[in-house]
Image: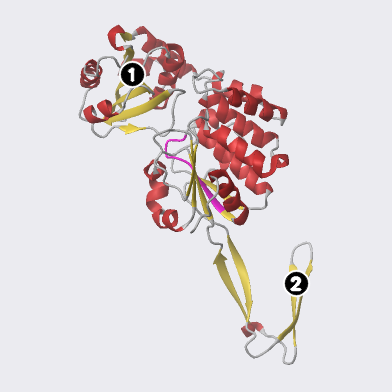
Amino acid sequence: MVIMDSSPRQQILELIKKANNIAIVLPEQISADALASGLALKLFLAKQQKEAVLVSCGQVPDILRFLPGAENLQSRISVQSGLVIAIDTSIKKLEELSYQKHDRQVNIFLKSGGEEFGEADVSFVRKQSPLDLIVAIGGRGLEDFGKTFAEEAGRFFEVPKINLDNRPDNEYFGTVNLVDITASSVAEILTELLQAYEQQLLDEDIATCLLAGIIEKTSSFQHAQTTPKTFVKASELVALGGRQQEVVKNLFKTKSLGMLKLWGRALARLKILPAQNAVYSVLNQGDFEKSENGGAGEVLPVLRELVDGLGNHKIIGLAAEPVKDKAVLVVALHIQVPARHFLEAFQGAKLLSFNFGSFGLLEFADSKLSVQELESRLLRVIAGLPEGLF
């Protein structure tokens, strides 16, 4: 598809206007920013009478289920199909077609110029509407979309793609790329886009979703990438009916007891490396047992709490004894710390597709390593980082 020479925002608006069947795809590791933005876009497109599906091979985190429409996330791309009633007019000519609606049925009347139509002249065909557009939200590259991309690679390469992101390491994989590294979040980028498209369609639910994306990504306007423009967009969303108190309550004031217990145990074992401006902690099986309902799914939330409280450090790590038969290490790296040193030391580690404010996230799991070996390797990597980095 040839895209005319204009700004990415103008190109995106034109693509959306022309499309009728749209897939909004989110990374496998679903962030609040990506989910909130995807939900807002789906709600907005529905007001335009456009068919839109929201897709990810990942799961909606429990803390985000309050977002309007979160229950509509699909695991695969599927576009709406319809039933076509086909009339053979090769012999009998159709002169008039009409229909009459009743409470429980619709009668269709066919009038020919000569011999009447019969059952043999009518057939039924189920026709699938073609996919017109893919909107990829919050992914660095196509691999971030996991099975969604792997199972639908043909569509990803055949259909125009809009790539929305705010990170400098984005791979610009879209037909049109709107990667604004000055924006606090994808939700901020999308707010501006939808306002330019048709501001009056932004209702309370759409505004709430967009506001949730901005608030979560900025840790409630606390991280360094928060700009005056971020505050302006957030205030405009509140004015449009965005439910700020609902967002804050669900994102920051609702924490499971198990997670809080794990967080306390992680703080009790916190180890500080002043020379490298780093901190880390280790959780063992006993910690998970004593925290009762604080299971494997709480490792990243605990790291998030550590980042929120210790964000003046550049490296924040959390290792955990085998979770689902694998020892786990998650590390939050400030944007000033290159991830390559950690990726080289932990072969098979992956960078998650979402951030904690100014911190990128790395995750590593291995069934053959003990948590003590993970800790030793982490210490070697940190000790070997270039001088002057901190």
Please state the horizontal and vertical placement of residue 55, each as a whole percent of the image: 50, 46
Q: Is residue 337 magenta?
A: no
383, 197: nearer the viewer: 197
Residue 325 visible somewhere in the drawing: no
Looking at the image, residue 348 lies above or below residue 279: below
Amino acid, disc 2: Asn
- Mark sitting earlier along the chain (2/1): 2
Q: Residue furthest front?
A: 5
Q: Residue at x 38, y 10 (%)?
A: 267
For mark 1, give the secondary structure. strand
**Type of colouring:** secondary structure
The residue beneath circle 2 is 107
The count of marks equals: 2
The residue beneath circle 1 is 317
Please state the horizontal and vertical placement of residue 136, each as a whole percent of the image: 48, 44
Q: Which residues are magenta?
A: 22-30
Q: CA distance from mark 2 to mark 1?
A: 67 Å
Please state the horizontal and vertical placement of residue 163, each as a whole percent of the image: 48, 44
